[in-house]
Image (cartoon, rainbow, N blue to C red):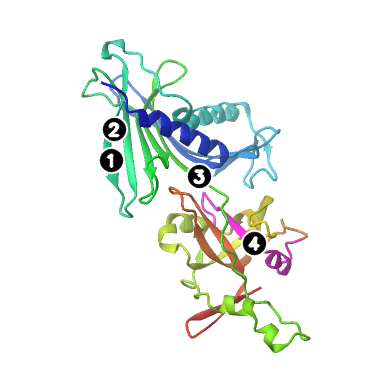
Amino acid sequence: DQSDPRFEKWLNRSQNIYATHHMIAYVRLAHLDSKGDRSGEAEFRYDRYPDKIERITRNDVSFVRKKGKKWIQSDDWGETGEPAEPEALKLIQVVISYADLPLRTKGESRDRSQGAVVVRVVDQRKTKEGNEEIVFEQGREHQKPDLNYPKYTFFRYKDADPDDVVLSEFSGPVYESGGGKVQLDVRYDYLVAVKMEAITPAPSAPDKNASAEKAAGPTMGKSASLPPPISDKIYTFAQIEKQKAELKDKIVRIEIRYLLGEPSDLLGDGTQRYIVKDTSKGATPYGQVAFPREGLEKMGLANDPHREGPFTLYARVHVFPEKKAAAICVAIGTHVAVENRKATYSW
């Protein structure tokens, strides 16, 4: 019985993707007794920006490490905080090792009576969107029917090439350093920096010296062709992430508390992408927002990007064309005027 050669190829591809993009790992751990029963479950979220910053969150507590610095307890992505306690540092290293384990190792088997490790496809299914999930089991030549073996789920978009896949989930028992077993479940997401169509809102106030033709030029027309907000409600980043399939390309209203960290130039035209904290009191109040230069200036954030709000924004929800990649909000204005089902947004 031969292992499926696609497994190693796809795992290597996934390693490269998660090593070069903002990786998000949702980690769930539980101790396993000799009968395979679980106890002491714990859940964490691990974010890693390559060569920039790492963050681990459990419940409402977050620990952050910027490149070249030490771990601190921080709720604002490392802008402020206190040094992490020794016990917290131990936990941090454990969580990181488990988040990386499915990507960096092909597992460990200690029962020689079952023969060699054999990786097989045990399930291949389609999602409701028509995408594919291919599940590999890391089994054995003579495996036992009552045992739980590690499973790796790879995702492929419906129109993607055969090898255009990425590891999206891992589930199975793994050995801990003390020799016992732990049930490990990890769900992987990642963010990519992609080129997006820039949306230019209408200017806040036309130049009095400009001609009527110029004032009603392509910028105004482009804004006027946008749809109105999907509703008057204020969306949190957690709600946007959860409902991103339904909110894709829709305009939503968001309320933000402040911007975090340093921006990245998303489009090469001055558009700045920030990590942003919204005004909700939930466990995950963070999201990504891309601001045009004019927007930051009109909001008074160009020279003081970390000034505290709240600020109300209208933004288009952009969903990256990769497996379960998180959404980003593209800010288009702070004011809206709706007429004949068309909306004009301005700063």
Label whose residue precedes the other's in the sequence (1 or 4) = 1
Left or right of residue 118, residue 275 in this image: right
Label whose residue precedes the other's in the sequence (3 or 1) = 1
Mark 1: amino acid: Gln
Give the residue at mark 4: 291
The answer to whether residue 132 is seen in the rendering is yes
The N terminus lies in quadrant: top left
Q: Residue at x 55, y 60 (%)?
A: 329
Q: CA distance from mark 3 to mark 1?
A: 22 Å
Mark 2: amino acid: Val
Farthest residue to the top: give it.
113
Q: Which of the 4 quarters of the picture holds residue 51?
A: top right
Give the residue at mark 3: 190
Give the residue at mark 1: 124
Element carrying mark 2: strand
Mark nearer the viewer, 3 or 1: 1
Element carrying mark 1: strand
Q: Which mark is residue 121?
A: 2
Q: Residues within 10 Å of mark 3 (few under 14, many from 20)?
A: many
Q: Give the magenta-colored segment's residue range.
A: 280-302
Q: CA distance from mark 4 to mark 3?
A: 21 Å
Label whose residue precedes the other's in the sequence (2 or 3) = 2
